[in-house]
Amino acid sequence: MALLQRSADAGRLLLDLVTRDPAFVRGGDLDPVDIPVFTFHSLEPRSFERKLAYLRDAGYQALGLPTYLDALFGRRAAPAKSVLLTIDDGRATTWTVGYPLLKRFGMRATAFLVTSAVHDDDAVSKTVGDVPESEWAPLVSRDESADRPFITWGEARAMREVIDLGSHTHLHARVAISHETEGVLTETMRRGYGEFDCPFVWIDGRAVRGRELPLGTPLPVSAPRLSARPAWRAAEGRFETDAEIQEAMRFDLGEARRLLKQKAEVDATSVCYPWHVDSPLARQLSAEVGYTTGFAGKAPAPPAISRPGSDPFAIARVGEDYVERLPGPDRRTLLSVLRQKLRRH
Ligand SMILES: [Zn+2]
């Protein structure tokens, strides 16, 4: 099974590499007008530091989100060799690892927060920049902790010094799309990011997921909320109506904007679609609630890097593994990047 999974992963990696990843990943140049957007999740200090050092030594600069958007909308061109670093979910290491390292390197990043997951607390924890390496362990593993796997609103406000904030929706929700089940609730689905992979289940008229459900609960076949697929309401034995889908999606998109404004004083104009899944309705509602841009995954068709004139609600991104494939004197070999990617699966 593991071997099959590995070969399936390897196959998909290679197909993407040839058909969907930007040319620089395969060893090509970077067009001076192109600004690659990289996707990060949990940050590990040595790996993140190495990537920032690579960017610095090869002469790249990591832009702030407003500067990137100026370039995307053709208002003002960015310098050649610019990149945008994006960090999804608002996991704790965005603060404990990302903030101090970005500050040290004089670079910026953009964090897309799941506003329901941000801890409602002004507390600001120490970072790996505050303590000796011997005391890093709890800060680096905080993403997996039961206590504070995400950032606090206090940390969100403090990180704005080097990290711009956007929305990753309020709930990062999956919904049941069938009466059939697939798999059961596991321990990892009750903690940190893992809860997002657990679909909402209706119990006593309330939608619950993750730690609110007993281990072993059978889980329905599900899909990301922004896919616009109708949720199956098991208790009522029916699917959602179009109006109910719209209402739920509008809430998920709009509530994130409202909380970012209220808790972090940010007018968030960018949304990042959970699991990189969106739909025409998701884009329409995003625009209606006030977003001007939507960040996705790999582009379904060329160009692999969004440019001025590209659809602002389908900004293409590439995985962090390929930062060191950008043209530069110490460019990492593709083979070594792929080996590392596969090892992680
Ligand atoms: Zn996410």
Image (cartoon, rainbow, N blue to C red):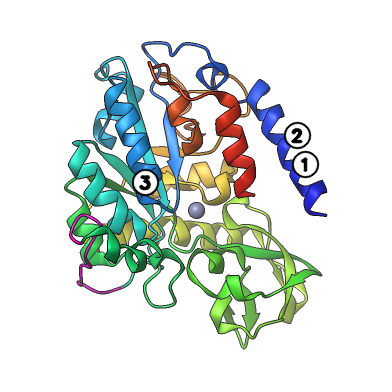
**Circle on res. 11:** 2
Question: Which span is picked out in magenta?
Answer: 120-131
Q: Toward the viewer: 336 or 79?
A: 336
Q: Position of residue 46 (x, y in %)?
A: 37, 46
Q: Secondary structure at mark 1?
A: helix
How far apart are the two marked residues, 2 and 3, measured between alpha carbons? Answer: 29 Å
- Mark 2 crowd level (few <14, some 14–19, many ≥20, 10 Å Cα): few
Is 255 rendered above or below residue 78? below
Amino acid carrying label 2: it is: Gly
Left or right, 2 with reference to 332: right
How far apart are the two marked residues, 3 and 1, measured between alpha carbons? Answer: 29 Å
**Circle on res. 242:** none
Most extreme residue toward the bottom is: 204
Locate residue 74: give its quadrant.
top left
Question: Viewer-nearest of labels 3 and 1?
Answer: 3
Q: Which residue is mark 1?
A: 8
Q: Is residue 265 visible?
A: no
Q: Which residue is mark 3?
A: 46
How far apart are the two marked residues, 1 and 2, measured between alpha carbons? Answer: 5 Å
CB of mark 1 within 8 Å of CB of mark 2?
Answer: yes
Q: Position of residue 22 (x, y in %)?
A: 54, 21
At 30% from the left and 14% from the top, the residue drawn is 80
N-terminal-most mark, 3 or 1:
1
